[in-house]
Image (cartoon, rainbow, N blue to C red):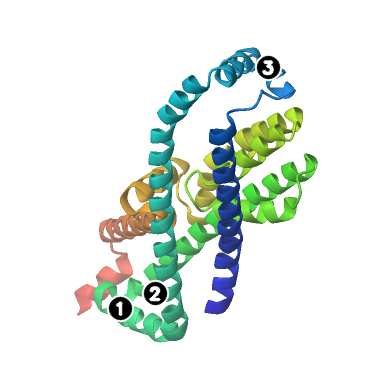
């Protein structure tokens, strides 16, 4: 089972890393060529961009005619780009570490899962008494609901991205859709895939399709996460939409990447346990406040 988890999680990630490595190599070669030969004239499609096309084309032509100004502008942009790359690499490394730890822990959960469940039942029965079984059932259903909500959202984003890539005629649209599914578990992950695809289409001269992918990704692929994930969390774990959103944001801020799952799960468990406790307290108060039937009073007096 652990091997299946590794294949399902690591295989798409390995493909993504390989593709990114190839793109970085091409980008480095392109930067070296530009530094040696200077920037080329802007393509015709740049001037055809709506609203900003003419301004961008004029700015590009000025840099082409003035090499020193181009070098100064390039150096000015190098600092922020380097900072973003370093921060992205650090976040990616942290995500890989958390992923490795998760798979490592998953192995032992599959290996000793039954004994751990029995042990947890014994502890909960000592702490909660006769309500332990009910509380454990609530916790299990809540965690499953959170998992189903996360996976359902990722499937929807991957499917929408794949459909958009297929409509635009992007090669390997099925593979790109699967990679979008994997990136959907990362905060703001899908734009790191459909964004470069839109840019690639623009550079290929397909301005219309590039704009289409950018709008498709922005309005559908990335936006659906904002309401579908909280909705699925509400449907599967009885967690209100607003609390689900707070759980996602707070989990990411507190725990990082793993907080995407841990935040909503902990909040949903706490919320459902609170509802169970409140219902039990209300039931106890009603029972204690209800009058004793006459037959029971007669029995008490006869004793």
Can residue 103 be seen? yes
Q: Earlier in the sequence, mark 1 or mark 2?
A: 1
Asked whether 15 or 23 is in front, the reply is: 23
Q: Are marks 1 and 3 in contact (CB under 8 Å)?
A: no
Q: Earlier in the sequence, mark 2 or mark 3?
A: 3
Is 247 placed left or right of 166 in the picture? left
Quadrant of the rendering where the C terminus is positioned: bottom left
Q: Which mark is residue 50?
A: 3
Q: Residue 55: where, in percent of width, then height?
A: 60, 13
The mark lying in front, picked from 1 and 3, is: 3
Q: Residue 99: where, in percent of width, then height?
A: 44, 64
Secondary structure beneath dot 1 equals helix
Residue identified by numbered label 1: 125
Q: Are marks 2 and 3 in contact (CB under 8 Å)?
A: no
Q: Residue at x 38, y 52 (%)?
A: 90
The mark lying in front, picked from 2 and 3, is: 3
Could you classify mark 3 by the number of other residues whose Cα lies within 10 Å: few (under 14), some (14-19), or many (20 or more)? few
Q: Residue 46: where, in percent of width, then height?
A: 68, 22
Quadrant of the rendering where the N terminus is positioned: bottom right
Spatial CA distance of label 1 from label 3 is: 67 Å
Could you classify mark 1 by the number of other residues whose Cα lies within 10 Å: few (under 14), some (14-19), or many (20 or more)? some
Q: Residue at x 60, y 39 (%)?
A: 195
Q: Residue 52: where, in percent of width, then height?
A: 62, 16
């Amino acid at each position: 089972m652990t091997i299946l988890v590794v294949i399902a999680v690591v295989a798409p990630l390995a493909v993504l890393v390989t593709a990114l490595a190839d793109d970085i190599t091409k980008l480095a070669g392109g930067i070296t060529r530009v530094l040696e030969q200077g920037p080329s004239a802007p393509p015709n499609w740049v001037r055809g961009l709506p609203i900003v096309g003419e301004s961008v084309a004029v700015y590009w032509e000025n840099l082409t005619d003035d090499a020193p100004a181009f070098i100064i502008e390039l150096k000015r942009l190098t600092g922020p780009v380097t900072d973003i790359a370093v921060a992205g690499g650090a976040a990616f490394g942290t995500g890989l570490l958390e992923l490795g730890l998760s798979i490592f822990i998953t192995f032992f959960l599959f290996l000793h899962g039954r004994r751990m469940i029995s042990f947890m039942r014994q502890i909960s029965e000592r702490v909660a008494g006769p309500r332990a079984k009910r509380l454990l059932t609530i916790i299990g259903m809540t965690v499953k609901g959170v998992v189903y909500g996360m996976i359902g959202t990722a499937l929807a984003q991957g499917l929408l991205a794949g459909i958009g890539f297929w409509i635009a005629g992007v090669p390997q649209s099925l593979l790109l859709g699967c990679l979008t599914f994997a990136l959907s578990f990362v905060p703001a992950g899908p734009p790191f895939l459909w964004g470069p695809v839109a840019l690639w289409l623009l550079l290929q001269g397909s301005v219309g399709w590039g704009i289409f992918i950018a709008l498709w990704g922005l309005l559908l692929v990335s936006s659906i996460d904002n309401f579908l994930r909280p909705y699925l969390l509400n449907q599967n774990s009885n967690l209100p939409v607003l609390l689900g959103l707070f759980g996602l944001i707070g989990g990411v801020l507190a725990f990082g990447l793993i907080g995407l799952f841990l935040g909503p799960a902990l909040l949903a468990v706490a919320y459902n346990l609170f509802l169970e406790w409140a219902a039990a307290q209300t039931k106890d108060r009603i029972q204690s406040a209800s009058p004793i039937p006459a037959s029971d009073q007669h029995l008490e007096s006869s004793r």
